[in-house]
Amino acid sequence: MVTLNRIYTRTGDKGTTALASGERRSKADLRVETYGTVDETNACLGLVRLHADPALDAMLGLIQNDLFDLGADLATPETGEPLPYEPLRMVDAQVKRLEADIDALNANLSPLKSFVLPGGSPAAAALHLARTVCRRAERLAVALAATEGENVSAPALQYLNRLSDFLFVASRAANANGADDVLWVPGKNR
């Protein structure tokens, strides 16, 4: 359980922060940037929920909790050294739940014949913003995983990949199941 009695600690005043293991890293560290961008995705979802219908809101509530799990996973690097606690890790079941939600939302959508421009309803526009931030988090996680001495679990990477897919499908669902999508018209303004 997390207890936050004091919000400012002054320990980061010189540009470092603590990982869950207690290790100090620069606030510009790739791992910190990665879980910070996961947090940014989560904040975008908070805005989406202001415009979401109850079914989508329920899905997004689960995802927001998952994103805190993902942040905890990323903030606790796997080093092979024992920790005094069991670190929270992403699991395959979280990825599978996202896939089931994608399939449920996608079942009601008409096939696409063009790329979709971000926009339409307020919920759809906010979902597109969340999708692009999520894609950035995914790119950072992939770069982190490719860095020598850094590990990112397969479920963590898969979750970010599925989440951006979910956010795209959810944006179409929020646009009257695709009827109000704003479609790209190649070369329209030449």
Image: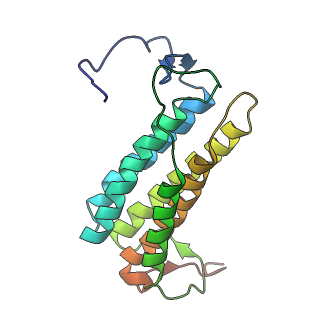
Q: Is residue 14 left or right of residue 63?
A: right
Could you tell me which quadrant the N terminus lies in?
Answer: top left
For residue 45, above or below residue 109: above
**Closer to us: 4 or 100:** 100
Depth check, front residue: 114 or 185: 114
Q: Position of residue 162 (x, y in %)?
A: 55, 61
Q: Is residue 53 visible?
A: no
**Along the line of sight, the residue nearer the viewer: 172 or 105:** 105
Q: Is residue 140 above or below residue 95?
A: above
In the image, what residue occupies the spot 53% across and 29% down? 76
Residue 7 locus on image (x, y percent): 28, 21
Quadrant in the picture for residue 24: top right
Left or right position of 171 against 30: left
**In this rendering, would 17 be left or right of 186?**
left
Q: Position of residue 23 (x, y in %)?
A: 54, 16
Q: Which residue corresponds to the image point at 74% horizontal and 39% vertical from the top-left?
A: 146
Q: Residue at x 60, y 54 (%)?
A: 158
Residue at point 44%, 15% (across, down): 12
